[in-house]
């Protein structure tokens, strides 16, 4: 069974860990900051238990705020007319390239063809904190990560800044350094960095 690693109720997001011994298919992450009104989108979910149901529509609006419960608002959502029914919540909203641009989250019950999705940029902004285990959050690595960078034949994660006297500083890591791999496995993104850190113990070399 899947295990809840972390969650953010204010964003209606959670991270699950699935214990399997094989590689699972994954979706490529797109961007949601450049969505165009009228752009085609695809929603996948399990409405009413019908697994892997695919529906399509367009981006109707962006930056929508909706109240989903008393005192509970979700903000900055993507609005779409792609049918999002009970069971679709948590499923992916994709662009025509098959890239994740949102997480289906809510539907306007009293209206047809009005559904909402959490933008993937919101997901990315929150994942680094959500994926960091509680024990490592308390330790504070002292690293501020940038994006991926390629220099010649080397590709890695750029270090934007390092806090003085932090564990990273004591280990000699400096701003401008690149982290190429962890445990011999190359990094592909800042999210990949935190995923690889999830099972680390305090004091364990990486």
Image (cartoon, rainbow, N blue to C red):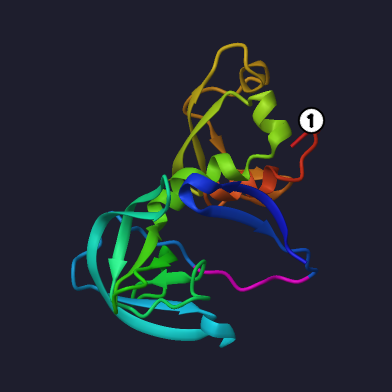
Magenta stretch: residue 28 in it?
no
Foreground pick, 78 / 201: 78
Instruction: Indicate whether 1 appears above or below 85.
Output: above
* Mark 1 crowdedness (10 Å alpha carbons): few <14, some 14-19, many ≥20: few
- Quarter of the figure that contains the C terminus: top right
The structure residue drawn at horizontal position 47% and vertical position 28%, both measured from the top left corner, is: 176
Q: Position of residue 191 (x, y in %)?
A: 55, 49
The x and y percentages for residue 194 are 62, 44
Q: Is residue 105 left or right of residue 87?
A: left
Observer-nearest of 70 and 197: 70
Q: Which residues are magenta?
A: 22-27
Percent from the top left, x then y, of residue 60?
22, 69
Camera-side residue of 67 and 155: 67
Q: Is residue 25 magenta?
A: yes
Q: Position of residue 68 (x, y in %)?
A: 41, 56
Asked whether residue 124 appears in the rendered view, the answer is yes
Q: Main secondary structure of the magenta part?
A: loop
* Residue farthest left in this picture: 37
Q: Residue at x 56, y 88 (%)?
A: 50
């Amino acid at each position: 069974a899947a295990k809840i690693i972390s969650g953010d109720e204010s964003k209606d997001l959670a991270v699950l860990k699935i214990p399997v011994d094989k590689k699972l298919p994954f979706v490529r992450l797109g961007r949601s900051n450049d969505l165009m009104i009228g752009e085609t989108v695809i929603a996948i979910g399990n409405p009413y238990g019908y697994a892997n149901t695919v529906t399509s529509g367009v981006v109707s609006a962006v930056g929508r705020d909706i109240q989903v419960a008393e005192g509970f608002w979700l903000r900055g959502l993507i609005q779409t007319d792609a049918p999002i029914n009970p069971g679709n919540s948590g499923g992916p909203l994709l662009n025509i390239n098959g890239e994740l641009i949102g997480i289906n989250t809510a539907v306007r019950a009293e209206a047809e063809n009005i559904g909402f999705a959490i933008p993937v940029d919101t997901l990315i902004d929150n994942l680094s904190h959500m994926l960091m285990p509680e024990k490592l959050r308390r330790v504070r690595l002292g690293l501020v990560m940038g994006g991926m960078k390629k220099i010649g034949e080397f590709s890695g994660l750029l270090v934007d800044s390092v806090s003085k006297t932090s564990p990273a500083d004591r280990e000699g890591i400096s701003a401008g350094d690149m982290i190429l791999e962890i445990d011999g496995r190359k990094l592909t993104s800042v999210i990949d960095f935190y995923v690889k850190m999830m099972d680390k113990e305090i004091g364990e070399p990486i």
